[in-house]
Image (cartoon, rainbow, N blue to C red):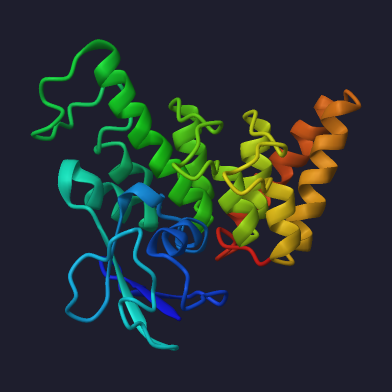
Amino acid sequence: MRVRLEETGEMFRVTNCRSDMTVRELKEELDLVVGVPFNLQRLQYLDQGVLMDDATLKFHDVVPGGIISLCIWHYDGWTELVLASVEGDPSKLSCLGITEDSFYRTANSEHFKGKQWQKWTSQRAFVALYITSHRGHLDAVQYLLEHGANCLSKSPVGRTPLHVAAAMGRVDCISLLLDYGASINDKDAKGETPISIARRLNRKQSERRMFLIHWMAKSGATSSVDKATKRVSQRARSVPGSKKPNA
């Protein structure tokens, strides 16, 4: 099955689909494959409108090889944030409500104050970090982490930015996330850790990098970890196209 992210025109292939798979299960898979958190996804097929989570693909007559449209919920400025995250431009992200001192407001958030405002901006920072980690935008990931994005936060299906970076083989982002305290032991709703996902998807370089940095940190070789991370970051910036390394 193929899924098109309508806002960008990108096409993604989902290989482990079944006719008895529910829409919810498909969205959980797309959380990893497309890098868009479960709660922001709106799926459509042909002219059937929004597909309900509890219905199966067979119920909606989805045929093998069919194309499902994935749209971002338009409320509360999420579409703009997702597009800026996919692009990976820190200057655009900085204007979209990812920090507490932001002037960005939506109809929903314009009256938020205190903890409510803090929760809203931290959620947006996490979504941006999740997507940029998935796409391998190292500069954007570093910008978000430096401005307070929490790499330990989780999507509604329990995944951290490290899960999706590992799934896509973004080795430079993996190193940076680990440097900021991301955990290789965090389990998602299916019990998978970033390492087990990397192993399942045959991202051998990602798996090795996580094991290496985790081992070095446990052994107390923090200076070596820092040097290794800096070398990865410098190499990623100096090589054209290295924001999206292969596993």
Residue 24, position as x, y percentages in the image: 41, 58
User: Is residue 106 visible from the viewing direction of this image?
Assistant: yes
Residue 68, position as x, y percentages in the image: 33, 76
Left or right: 80 as drawn, with respect to 66: left
Which of the two residues, 188 or 100, is positioned nearer the viewer here?
188
User: Is residue 170 visible from the viewing direction of this image?
Assistant: no
Q: Residue 216's image quarter?
A: top right
Residue 196, position as x, y percentages in the image: 73, 52
**In the picture, which quadrant includes the C terminus?**
bottom right
Identify the residue at image location x=33%, y=23%. 119
Left or right: 223 as drawn, with respect to 159: right
Q: Is residue 3 above or below residue 54?
A: below
Identify the residue at image location x=40%, y=54%. 36
Left or right: 31 as drawn, with respect to 210: left
Q: Is residue 3 above or below residue 200?
A: below
Identify the residue at image location x=81%, y=26%. 222
